Image (tube, rainbow, N blue to C red):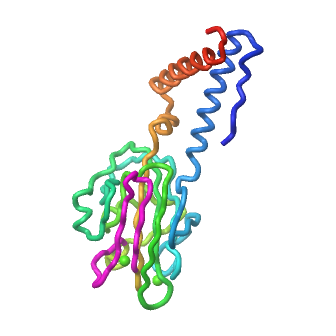
Amino acid sequence: MMRIRCPLSRSTLPMRWLSLMLCLGASLVLSIADGAQALITATGGAAVQIGAPANSRVGMLQSNTSIFVWEEKQNHLTVNVLPFNIDGTPGFYDTAASVAATAGNLPANSLVDSHMIHFDQLGPGTTTLSGSVEFQHPITAVFVLCDPLDGSDTELGSPVTLYPNCIDTGDFRPVDWVSTGDTEQIIVSPDRMKIDFTLRTSNVLDQLRVVTQQSAAVAAAPGLGFPAVALLVLLGIALGTRILQKNSLPV
Ligand SMILES: [Ca+2]
Ligand SMILES: [Ca+2]
């Protein structure tokens, strides 16, 4: 992260205040810019992050060793109410029934980032892989069943990617959890910052979408309305007073 150097000792008091406020503002802008990067902070196991692909339909993005992960929408303010299956509650999910209690609706006007997890094995047979993804912001919605997954493509999917749909895949687009001996499972970590998954595919694929919610500071940045500006000014005055007192400068 870039560091800001604030000259405070060799100027008049008004110039010290001006310098300090400018420095605080620059630091805030830089911290927001940092927050816009690296929304996926780590991948583990078979998970491999890629750029948003042109086509994620059946047979178009295959591997027997990798579960592909990509960023979809970033800094997206939702327009529609979007039903999901898991609200981010930490825990273990391995059946459609296990997500029933955590289903809900992502409200309109939510500032979110969305991420796709995709596994389509190459060739015949059946392949099971496990992986994990860690995020910069907490998980607030996971779309793992047909209707929520299909229903969120337009709003949360990458604009450059073609997606499959449940009808074309015989309802085998999402995490299906229905095959005999199926070991598919999802785990949301206690701090909501990580999702672990085991997926199994044969002749179709598995996809799930994870939404992470941004912090209040980042959420306030695009509009920077009067309440946000007033809050920042008060914060700047409080911090400025503390810094000048700490440096034994007149306040
Ligand atoms: Ca395949
Ligand atoms: Ca599956």
Instruction: Please tell me whether residue 199 belongs to the stretch shown in magenta.
Output: yes
Please tell me in which quadrant of the rendered image residue 160 appears.
bottom right
Magenta segment boundaries in residue numbering: 174-200
Q: In this view of the protein, can residue 31 be seen by the observer?
A: yes
Q: Residue furthest bottom?
A: 124
Where's residue 94, x and y in %?
29, 70
Residue 86 or residue 94, whichever sits in front: 94
Identify the residue at horizontal 31%, vertical 58% (top origin). Answer: 86
Q: Is residue 75 above or below residue 187?
A: above
Please tell me in which quadrant of the rendered image residue 89 appears.
bottom left
Which image quarter is the N terminus in? top right
Residue 175 or residue 91, whichever sits in front: 91
Q: Is residue 36 left or right of residue 216?
A: right
Q: Is residue 13 above or below residue 39?
A: above
Instruction: Please tell me whether residue 150 belongs to the stretch shown in magenta.
Output: no
Q: How many discs appear? A: 0
